[in-house]
Image (cartoon, rainbow, N blue to C red):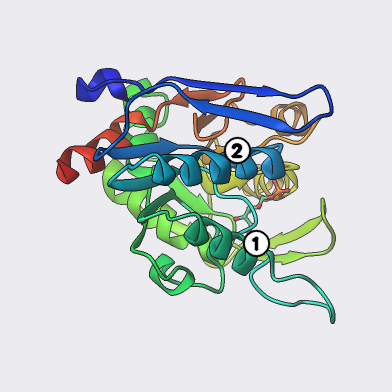
């Protein structure tokens, strides 16, 4: 991103003390500067979130004028409500911490927002949720393996992404109905369209256990789909997920680099760089 923008990449020293505590030192001059902090909160979210908090607090203390947070993958967004009595409202706690260290503005990418419709409702600071779906659709178009594909969102929330991808690919879309039966088990039902004889692109925000995608693929293939590809923004990929998806009969799976993974072939750097360009 720094390369794309032609700006300096700030230096940091991050390590652990022998007792396990985190040590962080800012190596660049930040006084009166606007600083963009990019921290994707994935896989070890507690550690990465804490690094972010240490860093932003230090930047503000060292005189940074503004800190703009870019959190390409924002963990804890799913626990935004108390589903069982006594549960911690993790999303609220995390947003309070981020604001508390002096973050001036925050950008996320395809943040999981089932109940919170707008990021601005979840934060007191200016908050923006960008989408990587146009970049993913462009990638699928460029690889050119799908002919006028039917774009499928595996649940109601995915309609927003299916719509964008379909528009970009000049084709039609539909969404399935999904019922979650457990952490790794879902039931997916088609609505109106049939994939018979069609190429299909499934789009979603997250692939975690792969359960959702595998169920959707099963239905699409049973309807007679010709070729099925999958594109997601955040390839969290729990152990075994990719193998499960591949053996379900998917021809290609692509994700972005909001989460590093073997399928992270689309970079969100241009998306973030564009926002920063508009800031300067
Ligand atoms: C949930 O609503 C999300 O949009 C994804 O569909 C979900 O997180 C995927 O999880 P999994 O891969 O475990 O089915």
- Is 27 situated left or right of 88 in this image? left
Given contact means CB atoms under 8 Å apart, are the residues at marks 1 and 2 in contact?
no
In depth, the one of 242 and 195 nearer the eye is 242
Up-down relation of residue 165 to residue 24 (above or below): below
- Is 32 situated left or right of 27 in this image? left
Around disc 1, counting alpha carbons within 10 Å, would you say few (fewer than 14), some (14 to 19), or many (20 or more)? some
Residue 251, quarter of the rendered image? top right
Which residue is located at x 59 percent, y 46 percent? 206
Badge 2 element: helix
The residue positioned farthest toward the bottom in the image shown? 85
In depth, the one of 261 and 79 nearer the eye is 79
Marks 1 and 2: which is nearer the front?
A: 2
Up-down relation of residue 177 to residue 7 (above or below): below
Which residue is located at x 70 percent, y 37 percent? 43
| Beta carbon at label 1 within 8 Å of ligand 1 | yes
Residue 173, quarter of the rendered image? bottom left
In depth, the one of 267 and 104 nearer the eye is 104
The reply to whether residue 225 is in sight is no
Around disc 2, counting alpha carbons within 10 Å, would you say few (fewer than 14), some (14 to 19), or many (20 or more)? some
The reply to whether residue 268 is in sight is yes
Which residue is located at x 42 percent, y 65 percent? 119
Quadrant (top left, top right, bottom left, bottom right) of the C terminus? top left
Give residue 78's mark: 1
- Is 247 situated left or right of 91 in this image? right
CA separation, marks 1 and 2?
A: 21 Å
Name the residue tied to disc 2: 51
Badge 1 element: loop
Q: Earlier in the sequence, mark 1 or mark 2?
A: 2
Residue 66, percent across and down? Answer: 30, 48
- Count of numbered marks: 2
Give residue 67's mark: none
């Amino acid at each position: 991103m720094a390369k794309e923008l032609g700006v300096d990449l700030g230096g940091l020293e991050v390590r652990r003390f022998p007792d396990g505590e985190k040590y962080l030192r800012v190596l660049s001059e930040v006084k009166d500067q606007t600083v963009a902090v990019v921290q994707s909160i994935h896989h070890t979210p507690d550690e990465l979130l804490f690094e972010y908090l240490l860093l932003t607090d230090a930047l503000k203390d060292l005189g940074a004028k503004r800190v703009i947070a870019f959190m390409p993958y924002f963990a804890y967004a799913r626990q935004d409500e108390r589903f069982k009595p006594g549960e911690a409202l993790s999303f609220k706690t995390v947003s309070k911490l981020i604001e508390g260290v002096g973050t001036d503005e925050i950008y996320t990418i395809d943040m999981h927002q089932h109940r919170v419709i707008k990021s601005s409702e979840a934060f007191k600071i200016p908050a923006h949720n960008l989408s990587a779906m146009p970049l993913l659709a462009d990638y699928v178009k460029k690889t050119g393996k799908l002919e006028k594909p039917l774009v499928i969102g595996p649940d109601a929330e995915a309609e927003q992404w299916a719509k964008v991808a379909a528009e970009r690919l000049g084709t039609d879309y539909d969404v399935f109905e999904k019922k979650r039966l457990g952490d790794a088990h879902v039931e997916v039902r088609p609505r109106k369209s049939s994939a018979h004889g069609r190429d299909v692109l499934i789009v979603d925000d997250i692939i975690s256990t792969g359960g959702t995608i595998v169920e959707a693929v099963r239905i699409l293939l049973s309807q007679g789909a010709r070729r099925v590809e999958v594109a997601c923004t955040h390839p969290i990929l729990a152990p075994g997920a990719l193998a499960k998806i591949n053996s379900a009969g998917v021809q290609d799976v692509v994700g972005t680099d909001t989460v590093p993974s073997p399928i992270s072939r689309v970079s969100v750097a241009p998306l973030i760089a564009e926002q920063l360009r508009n800031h300067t």
